[in-house]
Image (cartoon, rainbow, N blue to C red):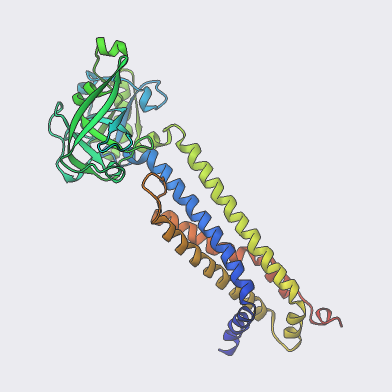
């Protein structure tokens, strides 16, 4: 028992006598922790802004126009194809999804807000579930579901009237819709979303001069609900063979194809890895200097019979305690700072990604101190004492 407690006694005694030095290193680790957590939260926030609506779709497959490179904005499918999609074996339900951007005109002189206006079919795949209010009813109703992010950035409430400005042809047009429901966070293309019935979307959406004079009913993609999700690959092959000019993919594949999403996430992850590498070098360098400064003390300990495992264990305890203190301070600082950010800043602290980041930060301490531990156990008592 005494041999087990001795490393803790030696480690804590030295840390208390040099508390300023160890606290300074803990604060450096805290800053690294803060940076790693915010990089992870930024990656999660930017990723959510791009994938959130697609990731929450109540669908199993998405249908694009063939050769559209899986770009939602480039895909154009005529509404006449909906019947063909519904007749494919294994398809339980189909919903059209159409996207465009509009500007919300806010009251009381507030700045306007750009939002994604998404046209959906009430009661079919593609329409998000509301957390307050009611769902959409008919394809032509002048109703709208509002993303929670719209409410956070404005004073819009359930039952209010939305005023939208869109460009149709060469002139600006204004339309009003009534907020009948509120959804959870459903960002699309890094901006908040509002959801309207398809024919309302087709009437309100921005149009070129040709579309104003010669309207055509098209949508961007179709969301498919399958009778048996396990048959997704078989149904995909049937659709592409039976319905002309279509390409069918799973939702994860569609998310990967969102412009810039994969490159953005790879960049964020690379920044996180390099930050962890910097942490390893900082901790390793500090404890290596610590060992070099106390070669004589380690030599005395070994001369009076202290074994190498005890010397190594004392170093490990110091490294772990210093790292845990730094990560704790940094995590608390990240939590407090996150409470002060406005909703316009795309930072989201996800429990899983934050836990992985904290675990990685706790590991970099022992990893960074491996060299110093190895050096400490190789010190020869007589040589350390100059004998």
| Residue 91 can be seen in this image | no
From the viewer's side, name the closer residue of 240 and 363: 363
Count of number-bearing discs: 0
The residue sitting at 50% across, 50% down in the picture is 39
| Residue 83 can be seen in this image | yes
Please tell me whether residue 181 is drawn above or below residue 77 in the rendered image.
Answer: below
The residue sitting at 82% across, 82% down in the picture is 385
Quarter occupied by the N terminus: bottom right
The residue sitting at 30% across, 10% down in the picture is 210
* Location of residue 313 by image quarter: bottom right
Q: Is residue 7 left or right of residue 193?
A: right
Quarter occupied by the C terminus: bottom right
Please tell me whether residue 288 is drawn above or below residue 313 in the rendered image.
Answer: above
The residue sitting at 60% across, 80% down in the picture is 16
Residue 149 percent across, percent down from the top left: 30, 43
Please tell me whether residue 317 is drawn above or below residue 117 in the rendered image.
Answer: below
From the viewer's side, name the closer residue of 177 and 266: 177
* Location of residue 162 by image quarter: top left
Residue 27 percent across, percent down from the top left: 57, 65
Q: Residue furthest front?
A: 109
Residue 238 percent across, percent down from the top left: 29, 26
Residue 97 percent across, percent down from the top left: 27, 29
Q: Residue furthest right?
A: 387
From the viewer's side, name the closer residue of 357 and 382: 357
From the viewer's side, name the closer residue of 158 and 54: 158
């Amino acid at each position: 028992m005494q041999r087990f407690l001795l490393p803790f006694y030696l480690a804590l005694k030295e840390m208390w006598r040099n508390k300023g030095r160890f606290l300074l290193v803990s604060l450096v680790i805290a800053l690294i922790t803060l940076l790693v957590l915010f990089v992870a939260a930024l990656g999660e926030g930017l990723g959510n802004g791009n994938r959130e609506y697609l990731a929450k779709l109540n669908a199993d497959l998405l249908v694009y126009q063939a050769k559209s490179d899986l770009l939602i904005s480039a895909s154009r499918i005529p509404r006449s194809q909906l019947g063909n999609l519904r007749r494919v074996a294994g398809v339980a339900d189909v919903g059209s999804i159409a996207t465009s951007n509009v500007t919300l005109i806010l009251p009381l002189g507030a700045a306007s807000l750009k939002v994604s206006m998404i046209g959906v079919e009430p009661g079919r795949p593609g329409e998000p579930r509301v957390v307050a209010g009611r769902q959409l009813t008919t394809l032509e109703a002048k109703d709208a579901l509002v993303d929670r992010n719209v409410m956070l950035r404005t004073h819009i409430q359930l039952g209010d009237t939305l005023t939208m400005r869109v460009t149709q042809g060469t002139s600006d047009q204004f339309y009003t819709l009534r907020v009948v429901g509120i959804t959870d966070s459903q960002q699309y293309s890094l901006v908040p979303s509002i959801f309207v019935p398809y024919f309302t979307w087709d009437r309100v959406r921005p149009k070129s001069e040709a579309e104003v004079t010669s309207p055509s009913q098209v949508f961007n993609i179709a969301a498919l609900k399958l009778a048996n999700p396990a048959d997704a690959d078989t149904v995909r092959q049937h659709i592409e063979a039976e319905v002309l000019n279509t390409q069918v993919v799973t939702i994860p594949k569609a998310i990967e194809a969102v412009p810039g999403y994969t490159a953005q996430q790879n960049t964020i992850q690379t920044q996180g890895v390099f930050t962890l590498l910097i942490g390893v070098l900082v901790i390793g360098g500090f404890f290596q200097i610590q060992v070099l400064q106390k070669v004589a003390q380690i030599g005395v300990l070994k001369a009076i019979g202290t074994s190498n495992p005890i010397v190594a264990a004392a170093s490990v305890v110091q490294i772990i305690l210093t790292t845990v203190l730094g990560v704790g301070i940094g995590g608390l600082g990240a939590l407090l700072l996150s409470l002060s950010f406005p909703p316009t800043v795309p930072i989201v602290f996800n429990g899983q990604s934050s836990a992985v980041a904290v675990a990685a930060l706790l590991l970099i301490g022992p990893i960074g101190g491996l060299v110093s531990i190895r050096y400490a156990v190789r010190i020869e008592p007589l040589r350390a004492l100059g004998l």
